[in-house]
Amino acid sequence: MTLEDLERRTVAAVAAATGTAALDEVEASALGKRGELTRAHRDLGQLEPEERRTAGKVLHELRLRLEAAVAARRAELDAVERRATLAAERLDLTEVGEVAGPIRAGHLHLVTQTQRELEDVFVGMGFTVAEGPEAETDWYNFEALNMPPAHPARGMWDTFYLELGEPETVLLRAHTSPVQIHLLEQGQRPVHAVMPGRCYRRDTPDARHLAVFHQIEGLVVDRGITFGDLAGTIETFTNAYFGADIHSRLRPAYFPFTEPSAEFEITCTICRGEGCRTCSGTGWIELGGCGMVDPAVFDAVGVDAAVWSGFAFGFGIDRCAQMRHGIADLRALVENDVRFLGQF
Amino acid sequence: MRVPLSWLRDFAPFPVDDPAALAADLDDLGLVVEAVERVGEGLDDVVVARVDEIAAIPGADRIRLATVEAGGGPLEVVCGADNYAVGDLVPLAPVGAVLPGGFEIGRRTMKGVVSNGMLCSGRELALSEDHQGLLLLTEVEGARPGLPVVELLGVTPDVVFDVTVEGNRPDAWSVAGVARDLAARLHLPFALPDPAPVAGSGTPVEKLATLVVEDDDLCPRIVVRVLEGVVVGPSPRWLARRLVLAGMRPINNVVDASNYVMLELGQPTHPYDLDRLGAPGLEVRRARPGETLTTLDGVTRTLGATGRGLGDTGEDCIICDAQGTPVGIAGVMGGASSEIAVSTTRVLLEAAHFAPLAIARTSKRLGLRTEASARFERGCDPWGIDRAVARFCELVGARVATGELEARARAVPRPFDLEFPVERVRSVLGVPFAPAELADLLEPIGFATTEDAPGSLRVTVPTNRPDVRPAPHGVADVVEEVARTYGYARLPRRQPSWPEPGALSDRQRTRRRVADVLCGVGAVEVWTPTLVDDADHATMGLSGPAVAVANPLASEEAWLRRSMLPGLLRALAYNANRRQGSVRLFEVGTVFSHPDEAGRPGVRSGAGGTGTTVLPGERELVTAALAFNEDDARTAVAAWRVLAETVSLDGVRLEAAGDMPGLHPTRSARLVAARGTPLVLGAAGEVDPDVAAAFGLAGRRIGWLEVDLGRLLDAPRRSRTAAAVSRFPSSDVDLALVVDDAVPADRVGQVLAEAGGDLVESVILFDVYRGPGVADGARSLAFRLRFVAPDRTLTDDEVGRLRQAAIDGAAQTFGARLR
């Protein structure tokens, strides 16, 4: 057999190989240890040196050509086999449901999310976050806040009392303001803190009220703090939390623990100030109360009003969530329906 | 409080063309306008009609057909009211009329009958609140068919502001008070009504009545006048109309005059029928315990009973007749026996100043809040009494006995002076005001000012402002008046800054991480009630006392929760009932313990507080109820491991526990931080199947995880210093050890790890086998031990020795045998 025949036959066999195994056989029979080309190489020894060099070169070039042909075919066949393997491994990922993929997202309660957002805004403004107990004595909830026993203003907070001690001495806090008293009693100066927490009022629940609810309160006690600082802080917070186009305004109000006191309103988040049903056409909605800390409160906790002055503010966390997320009825927050909670 | 603009205009010339602007000014003064109501408009077409015939409409039992005459011939009108009869005069809105509120009357067909207009109620005409039936005009003088109702009733268009007055502003809780603030804001002249001094045209009052005040601490000032020859009848129409606009029902000229004076000036008064008093005259004293009185509303009330409330001594101030029989609860409500009646001819008028706190206590304890008590408990002007009395006499217009009876304590509030450092305005409000500017702001609302020395203003606080305290605190009160009258919106704003950075505490950060971990394992956070039914505690097997709420809204919300288990189980059941049974829920919240249970010492309630009081114990828990797919106790443990890993807990063990209320006795464990003093951090396991069933979750396994956040923070954590990872290859040794079922697997793993010392990289339990080849009551635990040295590759010899040490350790400690 001539070398030409060998090359032709081998090239044809390489092309005809339909799998890597068949190609291996072709390669072995042509190029392997016992292959024809190897034998031809061995036969070179019988030739004269001059002929041997010429024939050797021819054989070497032939080997290179055949090796290239095998490699090229191998690459083709590898690709085919990879495609087949991958095709067999195909997954429809949209089949991944509860059985196939038992991982799913949990959700933080909307109130928790709202509280975190509020805390983060205030932390960014330089506030720390303080907390206090839910069961309190009359002193923290009322008396130290400039409401001695039988003070008519106590009626502003319909309070749950606990069957402990003398009647009406232990209660569930009706607001987060007792935390202010704890902070100031501990002697902390200056104070720049917000105080979120759960509060209790003996109000029959409706779409806009819950008997158990969450409030966040702010207290700043420092040197040279003015009413202007209060109004500025409220405005900064309002822009940061509700958006740059939402503003705040203050109007006179009464709280026993602040003087001057104010109610703070923000641009209606529904109509953005145009006037709508939610804001009774005024363009403003009430958010919370605030004011300069009353000197009687400073007296009760031993703050020297000649050195320190301060302001406080407070509003409902649940109400914020209601406004931000368009919740028609606040009671949805305590139903614990995962279809509701899972939206957020 | 409903305030008609026409009434406000008695005191200052307010413009009538822009009520919305007036409302905005009132808002800005802190007199919040809840609503602006236009009244008396849209009545131009409404006329008086005479009912000539009433006929039933076939097939209709609610409506009838009335034939009326309104000057233009018989007209048939369908009407649903039944308070009128043939011959009555009623208001008719003919077809085409537009009623208040923009309601246009059309020709309508009802039950096949054509109605040519509408007969109207008081409310439909915005003339009163009454919607029980038609507004009957039969008795109104001058009423005749065809006469416009506007003309008949003298109704003119008006605007009523519904104003909410804050609790500290009794001075503004009257029409004149609102007018004073508004006039000051608008720089309009303001004048109080100035009734002529009561001349006295009859018998000396001393001959007609007596006055004794026994307890002048409760009643610092009282004035009594007697009116003779009184004719009780309807009030003049203009007065009745004003009462209606203000939301009060006209009764008779005497009672109406008293109410009118209260609305106008803020001073409640009380008229008695002098001849119906047991003996002529009044006595004011404390009620004796157990005394009773039937008040005007017909309820018999027991007085002088010690109240529940803090500081409630059971004191009631009462008004008695001259023989000591109670005839009224002072400042709250009069008695039924001496009520003004048609037969009354002699009226004794009481006008007093009562101690605000006493009225507040009585009103709260009796649950009786009236227009009078609400004003007295906030504090009326003790020197406004005389004007009120004169105004009453002027309005009733009878013969007034000469002279008055007056009793006065030594301590009747008087105007007082306050040294007002002008600088304080700047330090509180942030902007300076000149003394003259302050005077301009304060004088129009009744605070006289004198500039004593440069920088100091003497402010005289009037007696109608009990909210303004003496110095030093009163300075803040006056600053508020300055800010209020100047306008809060005009004060400049400033964003304060300070060097201290804002931050969350360790507890707050940890709480967030824990909640995030539970979210990460697929749990949904819920918010279950803190106020629960104590029966829930019994159901879950929790014994001992719960803290009770003294005044719960409902019996199932009458205790503080001691556990979150019932709440979470209810939430699971709620969702399961809505075909959402496969869920994981968690909650972060407070549970409360009764002080008796915890044996806690008393907690002092604060320096100036009410002494030593025992508070409930509070613990903040993180709890999870895991009921997704095949969840069980193992899911809870796996979740706990993730959680413990996330907060870098060090040395936490599970200790099987069969005694935890509500939890499965053989599938639950305590979570114990064992480094140092053991600390129970919580529990992991499964809900007791019987408890689950009791909450509507029968036949389900529910994994339960409960962690005390406070203790979690106290538990030892791993060092935060980095340890280098070995760069040499590690060697694995697998050991299958047969150990008794009673031996916890994690203890075995721990012993294996200890045996390898520093060279152990990890010990992992990868298989548990029970069955042939392993004795009953035992199981085979297969552990993979991975060894590595920081500085070399371990030799086969070394690994062999480590393997043997591990086997020996397990054998010695637990009698474990290599399988």
Image (cartoon, helix red, strand yellow):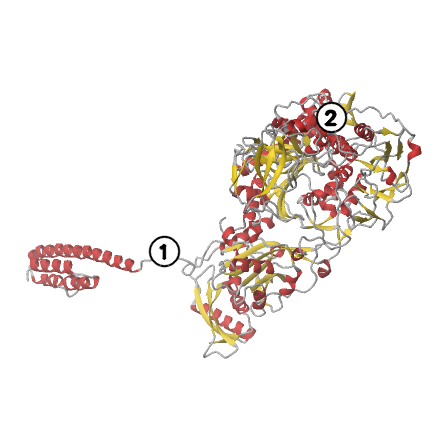
Closer to the camera in the image, B584 or B317: B317
Residue at the spot 10% in from the left edge and 58% down from the top edge: A7
Q: Are marks 2 and 1 on the same chain?
A: no
Closer to the camera in the image, A111 or A196: A111
Q: Residue B96 location, x and y as percent?
A: 54, 30
Inspect the image, locate mark 1, and give the three-letter code of the amino acid beneath it. Leu
Residue at the spot 71% in from the left edge and 43% down from the top edge: A181
Q: Which residue is mark 1?
A: A93
User: Is any atom of residue A173 visible in this view?
Assistant: yes
User: Which element is circle 1 on?
Assistant: helix
Please identify the quadrant where the N terminus of chain A is shown.
bottom left
Closer to the camera in the image, B92 or B674: B92
User: Is any atom of residue B416 visible in this view?
Assistant: no
Inspect the image, locate mark 2, and give the three-letter code of the amino acid beneath it. Ile
Q: Residue A78 location, x and y as percent?
A: 24, 57
Q: Which residue is mark 2?
A: B445
Whether residue A314 is situated above or below residue A96 in the rendered picture:
above
Whether residue B731 is situated above or below residue B530 in the rendered picture:
below
| Numbered label attached to residue B292 | none
In the image, taking residue A115 as reference, residue B337 lies left or right, namely: right
Q: Quadrant of residue B644?
A: bottom right
Q: Quadrant of residue A152?
A: top right
C-alpha separation, residue under disc 2 versus residue under disc 1: 76 Å
Q: Quadrant of residue A40?
A: bottom left
Q: Chain of mark 2?
A: B
